[in-house]
Image: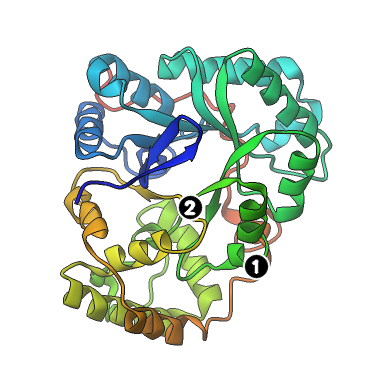
Amino acid sequence: MPIERRDILPGYSISRILKGSWHLSSGHGPGIERDQAIRDMAAFVEAGVTTFDCADHYLGVEQLIGDFRRQYPGLARQLQVHTKYVPDWDALPTLKREDTVRIIDRSLQRLGVDTLDLVQFFWWNWKTPGAVETALVLKDLQRQGKIRHIGVTNFSTPQLQQLVDAGVPVAVNQLQYSLVDRRAERLQLPYCRDKGIAVVTYGHLLGGFLSADWIGQPEAGEPFANRSLKKYKLILEDFGGWGLFQELLVALRQIGERLGVGPGEVALRWTLDQPGIDGCIVGATSTRNLARNQKVFDIALSDADRAQLAAICDRRTGPQGDCYELEIDPTSRHGSIMRRNQNSLEDKPWPGTP
């Protein structure tokens, strides 16, 4: 079947699988060769994955997508690009309107567009005032035509509510959600449904851990191949440890064998089936798993499949709390690995850039 689409706003449609781009960042891990990355983008759009997720602090990625747009103008007309505005932690106390305007203008220039399809806002430290006021600057830039839609990412529910109550037109919320991380179910997903806010999610494949390759393997530890594995290993520890995760992997493989797919596709299908989930971001450094992702729309989980997964996941011990509360706390295990000052870094040259 073709990649499903969903109208999440009047006149605005996205592919239900979004191409994630954090893995392409020069700050994530070993770099990807520029020309191959651009050819891969073309293959994704041709396959129906027309919505790309990126950020102003994913070093080199906005420029890379802009280069793709210029090299493939026909395919670029089918593209929706969701970027982010993430001012640095250290910049928050002195952040001014002109700083926000400058960074939005930088995204426009890098992506080679007159209007950003979606800007997802994040504020690192709510003890520092200014989050609501900065979001209202984005609202003003929306009125000027520089931004089409405003979204948020990685806010707790009370933080999101503050923005909405202040009149920020939040259209889309990007949050972490998966079989393993169910924090959003308690407060944030119901709030978004109540307010009519579209939801796109990430973290379904746990940075690569949700793969048959990990079945029967010793518990993963340092050194990790990239920052995603480091991040999601902490989530797995909160979930209930390596043993419970192995049980989940085996169950996903059993279900996948019946359906003719792998564990990751089963996990992704589960997430897409949850109420209020409009799309799932899948990080990809290449087209290696593109055909497998397309098979997600050929399968359906049975009640018995869902019950088998629930019997394992209902034994989880965490992660606890609201969305991103662990990660935003600089004193926590999760927060201690975060890089909070990426926006101001000068983009590193992309491998292969002329």
Reading the image, the residue beneath label 2 is 201
Give left or right: position of 79 versus 145: left
Relative depth, front residue between 32 and 202: 202
For marks 1 and 2, give the CA distance. 15 Å
Q: Which mark is residue 279?
A: none
Q: Are marks 1 and 2 in contact (CB under 8 Å)?
A: no
Q: Which mark is residue 186?
A: 1
Tell me the element at label 2. Answer: strand
* Up-down relation of residue 287 to residue 347 (above or below): below
Relative image position of residue 191 (x, y in whole percent) = 67, 56
Q: Residues within 10 Å of mark 1 (few under 14, many from 20)?
A: few
Residue drawn where x is 75% and y is 32% of the image: 92
Relative image position of residue 192 (x, y in whole percent) = 63, 52
The quarter holding residue 251 reads bottom left
Q: Which of marks 1 and 2 is nearer the N terminus?
A: 1
Give left or right: position of 319 versus 69: right
Is residue 267 something one can see in this rendering?
A: yes
Relative image position of residue 299 (x, y in whole percent) = 24, 65
The three-letter amino acid code for the residue at tag 1 is Arg
Relative image position of residue 107 (x, y in whole percent) = 51, 20
* Up-down relation of residue 4 to residue 231 (above or below): above
Is residue 330 something one can see in this rendering?
A: no
